[in-house]
Amino acid sequence: METAKSDQAYEQACRYMPGGVNSPVRSFKSVGGGPRFIQKGQGARIIDVDGNEYVDYVGSWGPLVLGHAEETVVAAVVKAAARGTSFGAPTEAETKLAGLICKSFDGIELVRLVNSGTEAVASAIRLARGFTKRSKIVKAAGCYHGHVDQLLVQAGSGVATLGLAGSAGIPEEMAQLTVVVPYNDSEAVAEAFRRFPDQIAAVLVEPVAGNMGVVPPAQGYLKALRRLCSDRGALLVLDEVITGFRLAPGGAQQVYNVSADLTCLGKIIGGGLPVGAYGGRREIMEQLAPLGPVYQAGTLSGNPLAVAAGLATLEALATPTNYERLERLSAALEEGLAEAARETGVPVTINRVGSMMTVFFTDGPVRNYDDVQRCDAGRYAVFFHSMLERGVYLAPSAFEAMFVSLAHRDADIEFTVDQARKSFEVVAAGD
Ligand code: PMP
Protein backbone atom coordinates (compact mmCIF):
# COMPACT_ATOMS: atom_id res chain seq x y z
CA MET A 1 0.00 0.00 0.00
CA GLU A 2 1.39 3.36 -1.08
CA THR A 3 1.75 5.84 1.79
CA ALA A 4 4.21 8.41 0.42
CA LYS A 5 1.76 11.31 0.62
CA SER A 6 0.69 10.48 4.17
CA ASP A 7 4.33 10.14 5.20
CA GLN A 8 5.13 13.51 3.71
CA ALA A 9 2.08 15.13 5.28
CA TYR A 10 3.13 13.72 8.65
CA GLU A 11 6.62 15.10 8.30
CA GLN A 12 5.19 18.54 7.51
CA ALA A 13 2.74 18.32 10.41
CA CYS A 14 5.52 17.47 12.85
CA ARG A 15 7.19 20.77 11.99
CA TYR A 16 4.30 22.77 13.33
CA MET A 17 2.40 20.62 15.81
CA PRO A 18 3.67 18.54 18.75
CA GLY A 19 3.90 15.00 17.42
CA GLY A 20 2.21 16.18 14.24
CA VAL A 21 -1.27 15.78 15.70
CA ASN A 22 -3.90 17.62 17.68
CA SER A 23 -4.82 14.63 19.83
CA PRO A 24 -2.21 12.08 20.92
CA VAL A 25 -3.71 8.74 19.92
CA ARG A 26 -3.97 9.82 16.27
CA SER A 27 -0.18 9.63 16.06
CA PHE A 28 -0.03 5.78 15.96
CA LYS A 29 2.51 5.96 18.79
CA SER A 30 1.22 2.85 20.54
CA VAL A 31 1.09 0.69 17.40
CA GLY A 32 4.14 2.11 15.63
CA GLY A 33 4.49 3.74 12.23
CA GLY A 34 3.10 7.02 10.97
CA PRO A 35 -0.57 7.98 10.72
CA ARG A 36 -2.60 8.03 7.52
CA PHE A 37 -3.75 11.52 6.62
CA ILE A 38 -7.39 11.49 5.69
CA GLN A 39 -8.68 13.24 2.63
CA LYS A 40 -12.37 12.45 2.90
CA GLY A 41 -14.99 10.10 4.23
CA GLN A 42 -18.17 8.74 2.75
CA GLY A 43 -20.54 6.37 4.53
CA ALA A 44 -18.52 3.66 6.27
CA ARG A 45 -15.34 4.47 4.35
CA ILE A 46 -12.46 6.88 4.63
CA ILE A 47 -9.91 7.65 1.95
CA ASP A 48 -6.39 8.82 2.73
CA VAL A 49 -4.30 11.35 0.82
CA ASP A 50 -2.64 8.54 -1.18
CA GLY A 51 -6.06 7.39 -2.34
CA ASN A 52 -6.19 4.25 -0.16
CA GLU A 53 -9.69 3.33 0.95
CA TYR A 54 -10.57 1.82 4.31
CA VAL A 55 -13.69 0.47 6.01
CA ASP A 56 -13.68 2.68 9.08
CA TYR A 57 -14.41 1.44 12.61
CA VAL A 58 -13.15 4.55 14.39
CA GLY A 59 -15.96 6.79 13.20
CA SER A 60 -14.20 9.86 14.61
CA TRP A 61 -14.05 7.96 17.94
CA GLY A 62 -17.79 7.51 18.20
CA PRO A 63 -19.79 10.47 16.91
CA LEU A 64 -20.43 9.20 13.37
CA VAL A 65 -23.17 6.69 14.06
CA LEU A 66 -24.69 7.58 10.66
CA GLY A 67 -21.36 7.31 8.87
CA HIS A 68 -19.25 9.98 7.16
CA ALA A 69 -20.71 12.94 5.28
CA GLU A 70 -24.26 11.71 5.82
CA GLU A 71 -26.51 13.66 3.48
CA THR A 72 -29.01 15.14 5.96
CA VAL A 73 -26.25 16.13 8.38
CA VAL A 74 -24.22 17.87 5.69
CA ALA A 75 -27.32 19.68 4.41
CA ALA A 76 -28.24 20.83 7.93
CA VAL A 77 -24.74 22.19 8.56
CA VAL A 78 -24.61 24.00 5.22
CA LYS A 79 -28.05 25.52 5.83
CA ALA A 80 -27.08 26.67 9.32
CA ALA A 81 -23.74 28.10 8.14
CA ALA A 82 -25.48 30.22 5.53
CA ARG A 83 -27.47 31.87 8.33
CA GLY A 84 -24.40 32.70 10.43
CA THR A 85 -21.89 30.56 12.26
CA SER A 86 -22.19 31.95 15.78
CA PHE A 87 -24.11 34.65 17.61
CA GLY A 88 -23.27 34.38 21.28
CA ALA A 89 -27.00 34.78 21.82
CA PRO A 90 -29.69 32.11 22.15
CA THR A 91 -31.18 30.30 19.15
CA GLU A 92 -34.31 28.16 18.96
CA ALA A 93 -32.37 25.19 17.62
CA GLU A 94 -30.56 24.90 20.97
CA THR A 95 -33.91 24.52 22.73
CA LYS A 96 -34.87 21.84 20.24
CA LEU A 97 -31.69 19.84 20.88
CA ALA A 98 -31.97 20.34 24.64
CA GLY A 99 -35.60 19.20 24.53
CA LEU A 100 -34.68 16.09 22.58
CA ILE A 101 -32.00 15.21 25.13
CA CYS A 102 -34.36 15.79 28.08
CA LYS A 103 -37.06 13.64 26.49
CA SER A 104 -34.59 10.84 25.77
CA PHE A 105 -33.07 10.56 29.25
CA ASP A 106 -35.36 9.94 32.24
CA GLY A 107 -32.87 11.54 34.60
CA ILE A 108 -32.32 14.75 32.62
CA GLU A 109 -34.76 17.56 33.39
CA LEU A 110 -32.43 20.39 32.40
CA VAL A 111 -29.33 20.29 30.22
CA ARG A 112 -26.44 22.66 29.39
CA LEU A 113 -24.65 22.43 26.05
CA VAL A 114 -20.87 22.83 25.92
CA ASN A 115 -18.16 22.17 23.30
CA SER A 116 -16.61 18.80 24.16
CA GLY A 117 -16.90 15.74 26.34
CA THR A 118 -14.03 16.98 28.46
CA GLU A 119 -15.84 20.23 29.11
CA ALA A 120 -19.05 18.38 29.95
CA VAL A 121 -17.37 16.22 32.58
CA ALA A 122 -15.28 19.05 34.05
CA SER A 123 -18.41 21.15 34.42
CA ALA A 124 -20.48 18.30 35.85
CA ILE A 125 -17.82 17.72 38.49
CA ARG A 126 -17.83 21.40 39.46
CA LEU A 127 -21.61 21.30 39.69
CA ALA A 128 -21.56 18.12 41.80
CA ARG A 129 -19.12 19.79 44.17
CA GLY A 130 -21.15 22.99 44.28
CA PHE A 131 -24.37 21.10 44.96
CA THR A 132 -23.06 18.73 47.62
CA LYS A 133 -20.48 21.14 49.10
CA ARG A 134 -18.02 18.23 49.14
CA SER A 135 -14.68 17.86 47.33
CA LYS A 136 -13.75 14.28 46.56
CA ILE A 137 -14.64 12.42 43.39
CA VAL A 138 -14.62 8.63 43.11
CA LYS A 139 -13.62 7.38 39.66
CA ALA A 140 -12.96 3.92 38.28
CA ALA A 141 -9.56 2.86 36.98
CA GLY A 142 -9.46 2.62 33.21
CA CYS A 143 -12.38 4.99 32.67
CA TYR A 144 -11.47 8.10 30.68
CA HIS A 145 -13.45 11.27 31.15
CA GLY A 146 -11.50 13.69 28.99
CA HIS A 147 -8.30 15.44 29.96
CA VAL A 148 -9.73 17.00 33.12
CA ASP A 149 -6.89 17.50 35.65
CA GLN A 150 -8.44 15.61 38.50
CA LEU A 151 -9.70 12.78 36.36
CA LEU A 152 -6.46 11.99 34.57
CA VAL A 153 -5.55 9.84 37.46
CA GLN A 154 -4.37 6.27 37.23
CA ALA A 155 -5.05 3.62 39.76
CA GLY A 156 -3.17 1.03 41.62
CA SER A 157 -5.31 -2.03 41.85
CA GLY A 158 -7.04 -3.17 44.99
CA VAL A 159 -9.26 -1.23 47.29
CA ALA A 160 -9.75 2.51 47.04
CA THR A 161 -6.43 4.24 46.63
CA LEU A 162 -5.79 7.95 46.51
CA GLY A 163 -4.92 8.96 43.00
CA LEU A 164 -1.54 9.65 41.54
CA ALA A 165 -1.58 11.94 38.54
CA GLY A 166 -1.35 10.12 35.21
CA SER A 167 0.13 13.16 33.46
CA ALA A 168 2.83 15.70 34.18
CA GLY A 169 1.41 19.11 34.98
CA ILE A 170 -1.22 17.94 37.45
CA PRO A 171 -0.46 19.03 41.01
CA GLU A 172 -0.55 16.19 43.50
CA GLU A 173 -2.95 18.20 45.64
CA MET A 174 -5.49 18.03 42.82
CA ALA A 175 -4.97 14.35 42.13
CA GLN A 176 -5.56 13.68 45.81
CA LEU A 177 -9.12 14.86 45.50
CA THR A 178 -9.74 11.81 43.34
CA VAL A 179 -10.32 8.38 44.82
CA VAL A 180 -9.65 5.63 42.30
CA VAL A 181 -11.42 2.29 42.57
CA PRO A 182 -11.40 -0.76 40.31
CA TYR A 183 -14.19 -0.86 37.69
CA ASN A 184 -16.99 -3.34 38.37
CA ASP A 185 -16.23 -3.37 42.11
CA SER A 186 -19.03 -1.71 44.06
CA GLU A 187 -17.56 -2.94 47.35
CA ALA A 188 -14.52 -0.71 46.69
CA VAL A 189 -16.89 2.24 46.30
CA ALA A 190 -18.60 1.32 49.59
CA GLU A 191 -15.15 1.22 51.19
CA ALA A 192 -14.37 4.69 49.77
CA PHE A 193 -17.54 6.04 51.37
CA ARG A 194 -16.50 4.49 54.72
CA ARG A 195 -13.02 5.89 54.44
CA PHE A 196 -14.09 9.41 53.47
CA PRO A 197 -17.45 9.96 55.18
CA ASP A 198 -19.28 13.09 54.01
CA GLN A 199 -16.42 14.05 51.71
CA ILE A 200 -17.43 12.41 48.44
CA ALA A 201 -19.29 14.71 46.06
CA ALA A 202 -19.73 12.23 43.23
CA VAL A 203 -19.11 8.77 41.92
CA LEU A 204 -18.21 9.04 38.25
CA VAL A 205 -18.02 6.11 35.82
CA GLU A 206 -18.58 5.24 32.20
CA PRO A 207 -21.69 3.01 32.48
CA VAL A 208 -20.17 0.83 29.77
CA ALA A 209 -16.44 1.46 29.77
CA GLY A 210 -15.16 2.30 26.31
CA ASN A 211 -11.75 3.75 26.98
CA MET A 212 -9.93 0.69 28.28
CA GLY A 213 -11.51 -1.14 25.42
CA VAL A 214 -15.13 -2.10 25.91
CA VAL A 215 -15.87 -3.43 29.38
CA PRO A 216 -19.55 -3.96 30.20
CA PRO A 217 -20.84 -3.29 33.70
CA ALA A 218 -21.16 -6.46 35.78
CA GLN A 219 -24.68 -7.41 36.69
CA GLY A 220 -25.98 -5.13 39.44
CA TYR A 221 -22.90 -2.86 39.40
CA LEU A 222 -24.60 0.35 38.25
CA LYS A 223 -27.60 -0.23 40.54
CA ALA A 224 -25.24 -0.77 43.48
CA LEU A 225 -23.51 2.54 42.69
CA ARG A 226 -26.92 4.20 42.46
CA ARG A 227 -27.88 2.88 45.91
CA LEU A 228 -24.57 3.84 47.52
CA CYS A 229 -24.75 7.40 46.18
CA SER A 230 -28.35 7.86 47.32
CA ASP A 231 -27.56 6.46 50.79
CA ARG A 232 -24.45 8.59 51.23
CA GLY A 233 -25.64 11.91 49.80
CA ALA A 234 -23.29 11.83 46.82
CA LEU A 235 -24.24 12.29 43.18
CA LEU A 236 -24.04 9.48 40.65
CA VAL A 237 -22.48 10.99 37.53
CA LEU A 238 -22.60 8.75 34.47
CA ASP A 239 -20.32 9.62 31.59
CA GLU A 240 -22.34 8.70 28.51
CA VAL A 241 -20.15 10.66 26.10
CA ILE A 242 -19.74 7.45 24.07
CA THR A 243 -22.85 5.49 25.06
CA GLY A 244 -25.44 8.28 24.90
CA PHE A 245 -27.71 7.65 21.90
CA ARG A 246 -25.35 4.88 20.73
CA LEU A 247 -26.73 2.06 22.88
CA ALA A 248 -30.27 3.47 22.97
CA PRO A 249 -31.84 6.94 22.83
CA GLY A 250 -31.61 6.99 26.63
CA GLY A 251 -28.06 5.65 26.59
CA ALA A 252 -26.74 2.95 28.91
CA GLN A 253 -29.13 4.20 31.57
CA GLN A 254 -32.05 2.98 29.45
CA VAL A 255 -30.35 -0.34 28.75
CA TYR A 256 -29.43 -1.04 32.39
CA ASN A 257 -32.46 0.66 33.93
CA VAL A 258 -30.61 3.05 36.18
CA SER A 259 -30.82 6.82 36.48
CA ALA A 260 -27.91 9.17 37.14
CA ASP A 261 -28.10 12.45 39.02
CA LEU A 262 -25.94 14.00 36.31
CA THR A 263 -25.28 12.64 32.83
CA CYS A 264 -22.45 13.74 30.55
CA LEU A 265 -22.91 13.58 26.80
CA GLY A 266 -20.87 14.39 23.70
CA LYS A 267 -19.94 12.76 20.39
CA ILE A 268 -23.25 11.63 18.76
CA ILE A 269 -25.22 14.65 20.03
CA GLY A 270 -22.91 16.82 17.91
CA GLY A 271 -23.07 14.64 14.81
CA GLY A 272 -19.32 15.03 14.23
CA LEU A 273 -19.04 18.68 15.22
CA PRO A 274 -17.72 19.84 18.59
CA VAL A 275 -20.45 19.44 21.23
CA GLY A 276 -20.79 18.19 24.76
CA ALA A 277 -23.61 18.42 27.27
CA TYR A 278 -24.37 17.72 30.88
CA GLY A 279 -27.76 17.46 32.43
CA GLY A 280 -29.70 16.10 35.34
CA ARG A 281 -32.26 16.77 38.00
CA ARG A 282 -33.74 20.25 38.04
CA GLU A 283 -32.70 21.08 41.62
CA ILE A 284 -29.07 20.27 40.76
CA MET A 285 -28.98 21.99 37.37
CA GLU A 286 -30.60 25.11 38.86
CA GLN A 287 -27.39 25.62 40.84
CA LEU A 288 -25.78 26.72 37.56
CA ALA A 289 -25.32 30.38 36.65
CA PRO A 290 -27.38 32.40 35.75
CA LEU A 291 -29.80 30.74 38.23
CA GLY A 292 -27.32 29.65 40.89
CA PRO A 293 -23.80 30.10 42.22
CA VAL A 294 -21.91 27.51 40.10
CA TYR A 295 -20.31 29.34 37.18
CA GLN A 296 -19.76 27.81 33.75
CA ALA A 297 -19.92 29.58 30.40
CA GLY A 298 -18.80 29.34 26.76
CA THR A 299 -18.39 31.66 23.76
CA LEU A 300 -19.31 28.93 21.27
CA SER A 301 -21.54 26.78 23.51
CA GLY A 302 -24.62 25.64 21.63
CA ASN A 303 -22.95 26.66 18.37
CA PRO A 304 -25.48 26.76 15.51
CA LEU A 305 -23.50 24.46 13.17
CA ALA A 306 -22.83 21.89 15.87
CA VAL A 307 -26.44 21.97 17.06
CA ALA A 308 -27.68 21.57 13.49
CA ALA A 309 -25.44 18.54 12.96
CA GLY A 310 -26.53 17.07 16.30
CA LEU A 311 -30.23 17.57 15.62
CA ALA A 312 -29.98 16.08 12.14
CA THR A 313 -28.11 13.08 13.54
CA LEU A 314 -30.53 12.45 16.41
CA GLU A 315 -33.55 12.84 14.15
CA ALA A 316 -32.16 10.37 11.60
CA LEU A 317 -31.14 7.93 14.33
CA ALA A 318 -34.28 7.89 16.43
CA THR A 319 -36.04 4.77 15.16
CA PRO A 320 -36.06 1.37 16.86
CA THR A 321 -35.16 -0.28 13.56
CA ASN A 322 -31.91 1.67 13.44
CA TYR A 323 -30.88 0.29 16.82
CA GLU A 324 -31.92 -3.19 15.70
CA ARG A 325 -29.80 -2.79 12.59
CA LEU A 326 -26.78 -1.63 14.61
CA GLU A 327 -27.21 -4.65 16.90
CA ARG A 328 -27.55 -7.09 13.99
CA LEU A 329 -24.50 -5.78 12.12
CA SER A 330 -22.42 -5.64 15.29
CA ALA A 331 -23.43 -9.14 16.38
CA ALA A 332 -22.48 -10.46 12.93
CA LEU A 333 -19.11 -8.73 13.18
CA GLU A 334 -18.51 -10.10 16.68
CA GLU A 335 -19.40 -13.64 15.63
CA GLY A 336 -17.27 -13.43 12.50
CA LEU A 337 -14.25 -12.12 14.37
CA ALA A 338 -14.61 -14.72 17.12
CA GLU A 339 -14.81 -17.53 14.58
CA ALA A 340 -11.82 -16.21 12.61
CA ALA A 341 -9.77 -16.03 15.81
CA ARG A 342 -10.81 -19.56 16.81
CA GLU A 343 -9.95 -20.97 13.38
CA THR A 344 -6.51 -19.40 13.44
CA GLY A 345 -5.80 -20.39 17.04
CA VAL A 346 -5.36 -16.83 18.32
CA PRO A 347 -6.79 -16.48 21.81
CA VAL A 348 -9.03 -13.42 22.05
CA THR A 349 -11.83 -12.16 24.23
CA ILE A 350 -14.39 -10.01 22.49
CA ASN A 351 -16.44 -7.65 24.64
CA ARG A 352 -19.40 -6.07 22.93
CA VAL A 353 -22.34 -3.95 23.97
CA GLY A 354 -24.48 -2.90 21.02
CA SER A 355 -22.39 -1.21 18.34
CA MET A 356 -19.24 -0.86 20.46
CA MET A 357 -16.80 -3.73 20.82
CA THR A 358 -13.17 -4.60 21.47
CA VAL A 359 -11.09 -7.60 20.49
CA PHE A 360 -8.75 -8.15 23.44
CA PHE A 361 -5.70 -10.32 22.80
CA THR A 362 -6.10 -12.51 25.87
CA ASP A 363 -7.98 -15.69 26.70
CA GLY A 364 -9.23 -14.53 30.07
CA PRO A 365 -12.33 -12.47 30.80
CA VAL A 366 -11.86 -8.69 30.72
CA ARG A 367 -13.80 -7.08 33.54
CA ASN A 368 -11.58 -4.25 34.72
CA TYR A 369 -8.35 -2.36 34.10
CA ASP A 370 -6.16 -5.08 35.64
CA ASP A 371 -7.57 -7.60 33.17
CA VAL A 372 -7.02 -5.12 30.35
CA GLN A 373 -3.38 -4.72 31.27
CA ARG A 374 -2.85 -8.46 30.92
CA CYS A 375 -3.74 -8.24 27.20
CA ASP A 376 -1.05 -8.47 24.56
CA ALA A 377 -0.74 -4.99 23.03
CA GLY A 378 2.11 -6.20 20.79
CA ARG A 379 -0.19 -8.70 19.12
CA TYR A 380 -2.78 -6.00 18.64
CA ALA A 381 -0.20 -3.81 16.89
CA VAL A 382 0.53 -6.64 14.42
CA PHE A 383 -3.19 -7.21 13.89
CA PHE A 384 -3.83 -3.47 13.49
CA HIS A 385 -1.17 -3.01 10.80
CA SER A 386 -2.27 -6.09 8.91
CA MET A 387 -5.88 -4.85 8.92
CA LEU A 388 -4.79 -1.36 7.85
CA GLU A 389 -2.81 -2.79 4.92
CA ARG A 390 -5.90 -4.76 3.90
CA GLY A 391 -8.20 -1.75 3.99
CA VAL A 392 -9.73 -1.85 7.47
CA TYR A 393 -9.16 1.15 9.72
CA LEU A 394 -9.20 0.22 13.40
CA ALA A 395 -8.28 2.38 16.38
CA PRO A 396 -4.49 2.78 16.57
CA SER A 397 -4.45 1.53 20.15
CA ALA A 398 -5.23 -1.86 21.69
CA PHE A 399 -7.56 -0.43 24.30
CA GLU A 400 -10.22 1.38 22.35
CA ALA A 401 -13.60 0.48 20.94
CA MET A 402 -14.57 -0.43 17.39
CA PHE A 403 -17.66 1.50 16.40
CA VAL A 404 -20.18 0.12 13.92
CA SER A 405 -22.35 2.69 12.14
CA LEU A 406 -25.58 2.61 10.18
CA ALA A 407 -23.52 3.19 7.05
CA HIS A 408 -21.83 -0.22 7.38
CA ARG A 409 -23.29 -2.84 5.05
CA ASP A 410 -23.35 -6.62 5.37
CA ALA A 411 -20.66 -6.71 2.68
CA ASP A 412 -18.43 -4.45 4.81
CA ILE A 413 -18.78 -6.81 7.75
CA GLU A 414 -17.96 -9.84 5.56
CA PHE A 415 -14.96 -8.02 4.07
CA THR A 416 -13.76 -7.10 7.56
CA VAL A 417 -14.09 -10.66 8.85
CA ASP A 418 -12.16 -11.98 5.82
CA GLN A 419 -9.35 -9.52 6.42
CA ALA A 420 -9.40 -10.34 10.13
CA ARG A 421 -8.95 -14.05 9.39
CA LYS A 422 -5.84 -13.25 7.34
CA SER A 423 -4.62 -10.83 9.99
CA PHE A 424 -5.06 -13.35 12.82
CA GLU A 425 -2.95 -15.71 10.69
CA VAL A 426 -0.25 -13.03 10.54
CA VAL A 427 -0.45 -12.69 14.32
CA ALA A 428 -0.22 -16.48 14.77
CA ALA A 429 2.72 -16.70 12.36
CA GLY A 430 4.60 -14.08 14.39
CA ASP A 431 4.62 -16.22 17.57
N1 PMP B 1 -15.78 10.85 28.29
C1 PMP B 1 -15.69 9.75 27.55
C2 PMP B 1 -16.36 8.51 28.01
C3 PMP B 1 -14.96 9.77 26.35
O1 PMP B 1 -14.87 8.65 25.61
C4 PMP B 1 -14.34 10.96 25.94
C5 PMP B 1 -13.52 11.05 24.66
N2 PMP B 1 -13.14 9.91 24.07
C6 PMP B 1 -14.47 12.09 26.75
C7 PMP B 1 -15.19 12.01 27.91
C8 PMP B 1 -13.84 13.38 26.35
O2 PMP B 1 -14.50 13.92 25.27
P1 PMP B 1 -13.76 14.95 24.29
O3 PMP B 1 -12.66 14.21 23.63
O4 PMP B 1 -14.85 15.39 23.37
O5 PMP B 1 -13.27 16.07 25.13
Image (spheres, helix red, strand yellow):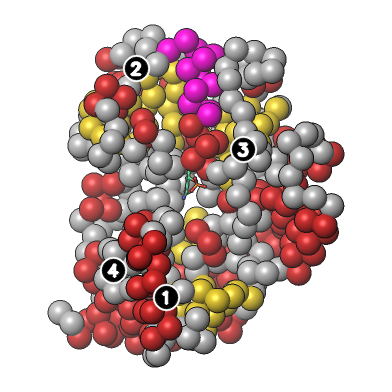
Read off the residue under disc 1.
9
Label 3 vs 2, first from the N-terminus = 3
Towards the viewer: 404 or 365: 404
Q: Is mark 3 within 8 Å of ligand 1?
A: no
Look at the picture and state if 65 lies above or below 337: above
| Structural distance between the alpha carbons of marks 4 and 1 | 19 Å
* Badge 2 or badge 4: first in the primary sequence: 4
Report if residue 111 is visible in the image: yes
Q: CA distance from mark 2 to mark 1?
A: 51 Å
Q: Choose the circle earlier in sequence order: 2 or 1.
A: 1
Real-space CA distance between mark 2 and mark 4, rounded to the nearest whole angstrom? 39 Å
Q: Position of residue 142 (x, y in %)?
A: 33, 44
Which of the two marks, 4 or 1, is nearer to us in this view? 1
Which residues are drawn in magenta?
Answer: 123-134
Residue identified by numbered label 3 = 114
Instruction: Single out the mark in the foreground, 3 or 2.
Output: 3
Position of 52 relative to 191 (above/below): below
The residue at 27%/41% (across/down) is 167
- Give me the residue at 39% from left, 90% from top: 1
Q: Which residue is mark 4?
A: 31
Mark 2 highlights which residue? 193
